[in-house]
Amino acid sequence: MRMDPFNKDPIKQKKYLVITGGGNRRWTFLSFLDSLYGPSSLISPTHIVFSFPTPNTSHSLSPIPNTSRLPTPPFLSPLSSSRVRETRVRISDRRFPAKRVSKLRIQIPPIPHIMISIPYLTALTTYFSYGLLFAFGQFRDFFRKIFDWCSSNNLQGYAPICLGLEDFYIRRLYLRIQDCFGRPIASAPDAWFDVVERFSNDNNKTLKRTDKLSRCLNLGSYNYLGFAAADEYCTPRVVDTLKKYSPSTCSTRVDGGTTDLHNELEECVAKFVRKPAAIVFGMGYVTNSAILPVLMGKGSLIISDSLNHNSIVNGARGSGATIRVFQHNGEYLPSHLEEVLREQIAEGQPRTHRPWKKIMVIVEGIYSMEGELCKLPEIISICKKYKAYTYLDEAHSIGAVGKTGRGVCELLGVDTADVDIMMGTFTKSFGSCGGYIAGSKDLIQYLKHTCPAHLYATSISPPAAQQIISSIRVILGEDGSNRGAHKLAQIRENSNFFRSELQKMGFEVLGDNDSPVMPIMLYNPAKIPAFSRECLKQNVAVVTVAFPATPLLLARARICISAAHSKEDLIKALQVISRVGDLVGIKYFPAEPTKQEQGGKAVKFD
């Protein structure tokens, strides 16, 4: 048994054991666990016990990383007792016949933290609904193959370009409810906007637009500070910039795509986030997916939050670095992150066990699907202890939280000097497009010479750059008014009011106070289109999110609050959501009294 150099207690060092003797035994077992528990939140089992009735072959025991291999069943309650599962798994080993079957006994302790606790009945009905959809889909596909067998429309030797579970999911599940997604709008995404009505004559397989518009309350856009609509300070300057520079530079930054606006924008962003330098890109998603492969590579270690955005996931995969995952938030987050770091530092690189070239911990400021703030002070403390770099994605937090809109660092009292790399986007709070990376001058200079998003992609549009500069000036009060401070106070007040009222109605609402993102849990697949369509009928536009953007059981409606929303807008939205919630049946908790004193008047929400 290899010992953990950070842990001097020999009893605690026997926590994670797996039998590794014989080729593919270990990975067969781990793959089995992945299929058993699914791709949900991660936990660390206290111990795993093997019992092999086959002859003893002097297997060796060794500790293994436990952070990215043992996901938790999403329906387990945080208060559930220890569970013992017994099953049979076929162990493949070149030295023994494949027909030998070994008995595997897994003991799982009480789970310390799961973000969402699903009632067993809800989990059961949700699984049953997906199972029914899958069964009917397979049944229809079976007859489809029979009817298409004699068809002349064949590929003549080519493999189908659309094949697999993704194609099946789109055809048999997504297309049924695709009218709930991708709704075109015909106005600026302000507090209210115009939604283009559509219809279908083939059961949603295709949708056709009409000339009719519905004026709807906008609860889906990321327009946190209201800059996406016409602004008295920003809009005239953007129009002047459009006339001067045109909509696009039609060139990369290293050729003819750098204007004085781009240099001014980078200086403005660096000053706003309180870092020495910054670099900007034309797309927020690319900021993560293109930067991480530049910073990390083979021999490096990325430790990522289990709920990080897809742009981070793809960037980490493309880097070639080793990736480990730690449990998202919760009471046990610091200890779990520290446990992952200690274990990986002790093990070193795969096969060679050499020290890692560098280690980076990646977190988000506000998680877009959960509305939760990261526990940044605890994460920074652990990263300092183990000399790991910190990468903070503030796509949803920069400009939206904090006294002056400077994000979670300001909100949680963290010095930005303690965060090595700060990333953010301009598509949420600033009413524009693109993203940025802020850090040391050496880091930014290195990225300007190596990052493909800077070297080969067209630079950010000059009018978009001017919009960002102007909105930052408004936030900081440099426009000569206090509108920026009023917007920040308004979004905080709106978010906390809306969240508290939803919870009083009995909805299961995720997220933390001050966060403008608040998911309402739906769970069952039938409730996804029902909630969306019923809200739209009553002129409230909401965004629903389901698998694969979330785990299979955890479908939700994601509400995004804006400073542009008035109190009357929020009260109307609450009235509609309450009625629809009763109709659809998504109030999973007992509701409090529906009357609340506001300004000396009683307001009734249902």
Image (cartoon, rainbow, N blue to C red):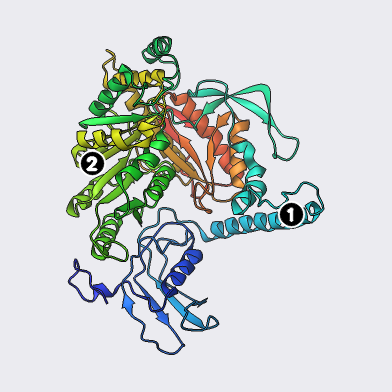
Residue designated by label 2: 419
Gap between marks 1 and 2, in whole Å?
53 Å
Between discs 1 and 2, the one toward the N terminus:
1
Q: Can you give x and y, in whole percent of width and height, for residue 499 in the image?
A: 42, 38
Is 207 situated left or right of 494 in this image?
right
Residue at the image position 53 percent from the left and 27 percent from the top:
217
Secondary structure beneath dot 1 equals helix
Foreground of the two, 506 or 516: 516
Please, which residue is most extreme toward the bottom here?
55
Quarter of image, res 15: bottom left
- Vertical relation: 411 (above or below) 89: above
Residue at the image position 40 percent from the left and 32 percent from the top:
456
- Vertical relation: 31 (above or below) 330: below
Residue at the image position 49 percent from the left and 77 percent from the top:
91
Q: Amino acid at mark 2?
A: Val
Query: For the residue carrying disc 2, how many other residues have a C-alpha within 10 Å: few (<14), some (14-19), or many (20+)?
Result: many
Q: Can you give x and y, in whole percent of width and height, for residue 328 in the image?
A: 36, 52
Q: Can you give x and y, in whole percent of width and height, for residue 216 in the image?
A: 56, 26
Quarter of image, res 386: bottom left
Secondary structure beneath dot 2 equals loop
Residue 280 is marked as none
* Residue 483 visible in the current orientation: no
Foreground of the two, 136 or 153: 153
Q: Amino acid at mark 1?
A: Arg
Residue designated by label 1: 140
* Residue 521 visible in the current orientation: yes
Q: Can you give x and y, in whole percent of width and height, for residue 294 in the image?
A: 32, 43
Location of the C terminus (image quadrant): top right
Q: Are marks 1 and 2 in contact (CB under 8 Å)?
A: no
Location of the N terminus (image quadrant): bottom left
